[in-house]
Image (spheres, grey):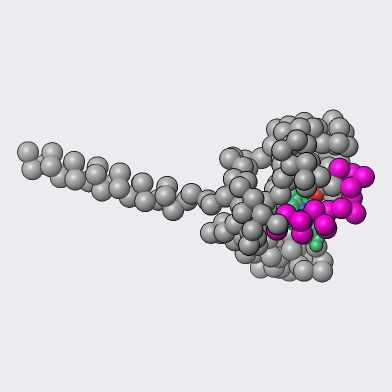
Amino acid sequence: MRFLATILLLLTIGLVHETAASEKKAVQPAPNGISIPAGYKDWRVIAPAHRTDNNTLRVILGNDIAVEAARSGKTNPWPEGAILGKIVWKQKNDENWAAAHVPAALAHAEFMIKDSKKYAGTGGWGYARWLGMDQKPYGKDANFAQECVGCHTPVKSMDYVFTRPAPIP
Ligand code: HEC
């Protein structure tokens, strides 16, 4: 009986622990109401990028719709439902090979979600960004997206997207 009680107690502790852990993981939506896209950590790569002005490494990822479009060269315009993600890390020199720049701290993850009707006010893309490992939503209010659109407007003729898919056979 005592044995059984102990097992039950351990199971309960385990459950409570698990609930607390999953609560901690819930990411708050961006100020414009966009939620962080599910499963983005498993998306495929469209291209890497390296910024020498602020020493950061980036990978641009896509959901299935975006990757199919990228692989078949149908990216102007990108199809409805495409989501592009960009993950940005500070760079450091590899400890065993200084000439190699490798990822250090995570700076942010950000997304562009193609929905011409829903996001007509921001050029047909919904913009959102989450900062750091604790994934804090970026922006004071919904207007933060104007900053994103503003900087992406020079590539309006490329459907507001800078990234050209990296060549893959
Ligand atoms: C200061 C200019 C600037 C601002 C502001 C900016 N971006 Fe970008 N963004 C870029 C550039 C340049 C690239 C492509 C090169 C790179 O990866 O750094 C890019 C790339 C991206 C990409 C990958 C797709 C693409 O266009 O290549 C996403 C997703 C993205 N930005 C989201 C956002 C979001 C969300 C915001 C606002 C919170 C934002 N950006 C604000 C300059 C900017």
User: Does the rendering let one see residue 40?
Assistant: yes
**Quadrant of image for the N terminus:** top left
x and y, in percent, of residue 74 in the image: 86, 32
x and y, in percent, of residue 108 in the image: 65, 58
User: Does the rendering let one see residue 50?
Assistant: no
- 37 and 64: which is toward the camera: 37
- 14 and 153: which is toward the camera: 153
Q: Quadrant of ligand 1?
A: bottom right
The image quadrant that residue 78 belongs to is top right
x and y, in percent, of residue 24 in the image: 44, 53
The secondary structure that most of the magenta stretch takes on is helix
Q: Residue at x 64, y 50 (%)?
A: 32
- Asked if residue 152 is among those painted magenta in the image, a careful observer would answer yes
Horizontal side, residue 75 vs residue 139: left or right: right
The residue range painted magenta reads 144-159
Q: Residue at x 42, y 49 (%)?
A: 23
x and y, in percent, of residue 147 in the image: 77, 59
